[in-house]
Image: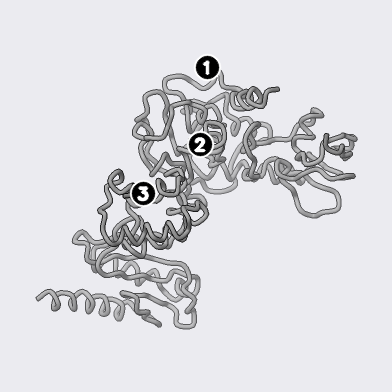
Amino acid sequence: MSKPIELTIDGRKVVAEEGETILKAAKKNGIYVPTLCYLEGVSSFGGCRLCMVEIKGSPRLFASCITPVAEGMEVLTDSERLRRYRKWAVELLLAERPHVCSVCVANGSCELQQLATELGVDHLRVDREWTDYEVDLTHERFAYDPNRCILCTRCIRVCDEVEGVHTLDLMLRGKNSKVVFDLDENWGFSQSCTSCGKCSAACPVGALYVKGKPLSEVKKKDLVSFIMERRSGK
Amino acid sequence: MPDSGAARTGLKNDRRLQMLEATIKQHQYSKDALLEILHTAQELYGYLDRDLLLHVSRQLRLPPSQVYGVATFYNLFKLKKPGTHVVTVCMGTACYVKGAEDIVSAVEREFNVIRGGTTGDGRLSLFVTRCIGACAMAPNAIVDGETVGKATVENVLKRVKAVLEAEMVEAR
């Protein structure tokens, strides 16, 4: 048993285990922190910057999904400043590709949409980028629309860490990045893909989805964390 | 004979492949040596095509997507066959301010080639690059490995025409 650590989150005294992240400690105690690229059951990399928190004594903001707890830490998960930064993060994600909710399969069950609503994003303060990627419909059961992708890499981590195949990866860099199958193959022709569908279950938006159904009809909630929990024998 | 994986990926079992294999063995098939091995592969073959990337991924037991991701992440790796002659124009801040864009568009117009691409006959490629570290000589262009400092539209076009013509003379 590892050493218990005491810290304060939003003025509440909480106890966490050594090595745990701030996010996990907050979740265990019912404190809500918005997340996007974080997915229970796979590794975290602190990419989306939505789970940022303030820690007393530092002017920096910390991504709570990758920051381990420390004794006596005083964490703030909600403040004017944090909300301002989070709002920007969502706006920039929305501006990066043409996210048009009205024609998206994920409309109504999209995590990005949910966050935008929560944070009160009603318009964008930057110009939108109208990317024109080809939609990949070659797979029998799944479809992939890079124009809706937010590059959270959840699908990549799930494919690598849960399914153990690593069919997906990112090509290029920065905003030009794109999730690809094998050597930028069409999905239907990928030799390594096992068609397990975990990537589409992990997708927070409508980039990877099951053909022919709106996302709200496809039960997928927490599939990955369920699998990981079963595997760990809990 | 040990399985070189060549038959499966359609690579010809020639001297280049043997050199590549030697390098891979030198690194003891270590996954961490991917960058070094891709460097060697590009040096040997000139560019990294599909078969080559697949071969490397099989030899190192790495997922193809990961190899592809690394190869596309770094600008230095070429995934398409470059032309016989290569013009690279520096688009670093200093060169850009000094008019590198004019040079690039002039080359594009004159030789009917798009930046990052190759002419239809495969004789000339045009690339743009980040700062090459010769800002004092801005704008800079590199024609077949030779740097043209304080470049103008005229002298770059002249230089490119010269290397293209030199090849024609050799061919005769």
Q: Residue at x 45, y 74 (%)?
A: B95
According to the picture, the residue beneath numbered tag 3 turns out to be B55
B166 sits to left or right of A76: left
Percent across and percent down for residue A165 are 48, 35
Does residue A145 lie above or below B158 as drawn? above
Q: Chain of mark 1?
A: A
Secondary structure beneath label 2: loop
According to the picture, the residue beneath numbered tag 2 turns out to be A99
Secondary structure beneath label 3: helix
A45 sits to left or right of B145: right
Whole-angstrom CA distance, mark 2 to mark 1, is 21 Å
Whole-angstrom CA distance, mark 1 to mark 3, is 42 Å
Same subunit, tags 3 and 2: no
CB under 8 Å between callouts 2 and 1?
no
Task: Choose mark 2 or mark 1, whichever is in front.
Answer: 1
Q: Amino acid at mark 3?
A: His
Q: Amino acid at mark 1?
A: Glu
Residue B146, quarter of picture: bottom left
Q: Chain of mark 2?
A: A
